[in-house]
Amino acid sequence: MTSPQPDNPMHGITLEAMLNELVAHYGWEDLGQRIKIRCFTFQPSIKTSLIFLRRTPWARAKVESLFANMKARQARAAAPRAAKVVQAAAPSVADSTDTRPRLFSRKS
C-alpha cells in the first residue's frame, strides 16, 4: 500500500512527463548544455532519452533534480504575484484613520 507523499514534488509524475516538460521549457539545446548527456545533444528524441535515462541512475537523478528545480522556480515566481494582488486589493486603514502627530512631514 502506498502512502500519500505531500512533500514529494515528483510523486505521480512519470519520467516521460518530466522529460517532455523540460524539453518544452528549455529545448534540447539548452537541456544538453545543462546536463551533459549525449542523448540530449546528438540526434535527441524522447524515445532514445527515455531508454538511456531508465538504464542510467545517475543521469535520471540529474534530470529529476533539474525538473524539481524548475518547478520550485516556477512556484517562487508565481507566489509574489499572488501576494501583490492581495496587497493591492486591500486599502491601507492606517493611512486614512491615523490621527497621531507625525514626527516627520509626509511627502506628497
Image (cartoon, helix red, strand yellow):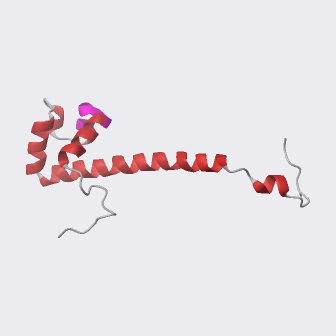
Residue occupying the far right of the picture: 101
Q: How many marks?
A: 0
Is residue 103 highlighted in magenta? no
Residue 34 image point, x, y percent: 27, 41
Work out whether 84 lies above or below 100.
Answer: above
Q: Is residue 21 left or right of residue 99?
A: left
Residue 96 image point, x, y percent: 83, 52
Is residue 26 highlighted in magenta? yes
Residue at figure coordinates x 27%, y 55% from the top left: 10
Identify which residue, 104 or 6, lies in the foreground: 6
Residue 23 image point, x, y percent: 25, 36
Quarter of the image where one finds residue 108 = top right
Residue occupying the far top of the picture: 43
Q: Is residue 108 left or right of residue 90?
A: right
Main SS type for the magenta part? helix
Q: Is residue 7 left or right of residue 88?
A: left
Work out whether 100 lies above or below 66.
Answer: below
Identify which residue, 57 or 16, lies in the foreground: 16
Residue at figure coordinates x 8%, y 43% from the top left: 51
**Extent of the magenta region:** 25-33
Residue at figure coordinates x 72%, y 50% from the top left: 91
Q: Is residue 91 left or right of residue 53?
A: right
Identify which residue, 85 or 33, lies in the foreground: 85
Residue 14 image point, x, y percent: 20, 49
Q: Quadrant of the N terminus?
A: bottom left
